[in-house]
Amino acid sequence: MSARARTTLTAALLLAVIAGVVLGIRWLTRADTMDGTAPLGDSAVILIPGYGGGSQSLAGLADELRASGRSAVIVDLGDQHGDIRGYGTDVSRLAAQLVADGAPGVDLVGYSEGGLIARAALEADPRLVRRIATVASPHAGTALAGLGAMLADSAACPAACQQMAPDSEFLGSLRMPGDATRWLSAYSATDDVIRPPDSSLLDGATNVEVTGACATGPLDHGGIIRSSQVWSLVSEFLDSGTVAAGCTP
C-alpha cells in the first residue's frame, strides 16, 4: 500500500472514530423526557385512530372538540399495521402543514395504538406539539400483542403488533413526559384489549382511570372512546392542562 493510500485510510478511520464518539455523546446526553414546546394558544387537533385505522371510532370526540370551537381532523394512516415510528413521521408532517396554514401549534389525541403514534410524532418534531392526550394506549405494551409477537408470524402479528409487545425495543426507545400539564393518559380498568389495563399508565403524565375517577361504569376497549364523559375529559385537558374532580368540566 502506498504512503498516500495509508494516509487516506488512516484519515477515514479517524473520521469514523470521531463520528462514533459524537454519536455516543449525543446518546448519553439524550434527554430522558420529551414534551411539546408549541405555545399554549388555540391549537388545531389531530386525532389518531387505533390499530386497524378507521375514523368512525373518533367521530364523536372530533364532534365534541369542534363544538368547543376547535379545528379537529382525524388522520387517515391506512390499517396502521406497519412501523409506528413511520406513522409518527406522517403525523408530524400533517402537523407541520397545519402550522404552516396558521395554527399556532397542534394537539395530538391518540386512541389505542394512536397514542404511541402521537408519541412518535412528538419525537419527530416537538416544536409543533402543544399537548398530547392518549386514550386506552398501551404505553407499557399489551399482553395480547406479546402473545402475537411470540408466534413470530408477520401475518398474524405485523410490525405494529410486535412494537406493542411488552418490553419491545420500540416502546423502550420512547421518552417519558416531563410536564404533566402537557400529557394526559386516560384508561379503563375494564379494558379487554390493553392487558393489564395499567399498561396505559405513563410516568410523568396526568393519568386518569376513568371508570373510577369519572364514575363511568365498566368500559371496554371500544366503549372508552365512545364515552361522552371521556370526550369531556379530553376536551377539558386540552384547554387547561388539568382535570376537574369527577371528570366533568
Image (cartoon, rainbow, N blue to C red):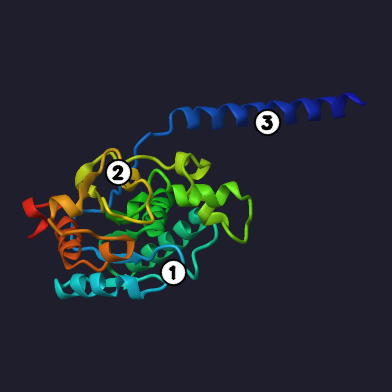
* Amino acid type shown at disc 2: Leu
Judge whether residue 99 can be spotted in this image: no
Can you give x and y, in whole percent of width and height, for residue 231 in the image?
Answer: 19, 65
Q: Earlier in the sequence, mark 1 or mark 2?
A: 1
* Amino acid type shown at disc 1: Gly
What is the number of callouts on the image?
3
The residue at the point 58 percent across, 46 percent down is 150
Q: Determine whether the residue tagged by mark 2 lies in a helix, strand or loop.
A: loop
Which residue is under mark 1?
53
Which residue is under mark 2?
201
Is residue 225 rendered to the left or right of residue 166?
left
Q: Nearer the viewer, mark 1 or mark 3?
A: 1
Residue 19, by quadrant, is: top right
In this rendering, the answer to whether 164 lies above or below 218 is above
* Amino acid type shown at disc 3: Ala
For the residues labelled 1 and 2, the Cα–Cα distance comes to: 23 Å
Kindly indicate whether the residue at mark 2 contacts the one at mark 3 (C-beta within 8 angstroms).
Answer: no
Q: Which mark is residue 16?
A: 3
Can you give x and y, in whole percent of width and height, for residue 56 in the image?
Answer: 34, 76
For the residues labelled 1 and 3, the Cα–Cα distance comes to: 42 Å
The residue at the point 19 percent across, 46 percent down is 181
Can you give x and y, in whole percent of width and height, for residue 60 in the image?
Answer: 24, 74
Question: Around disc 3, counting alpha carbons within 10 Å, would you say few (fewer than 14), some (14 to 19), or many (20 or more)?
Answer: few
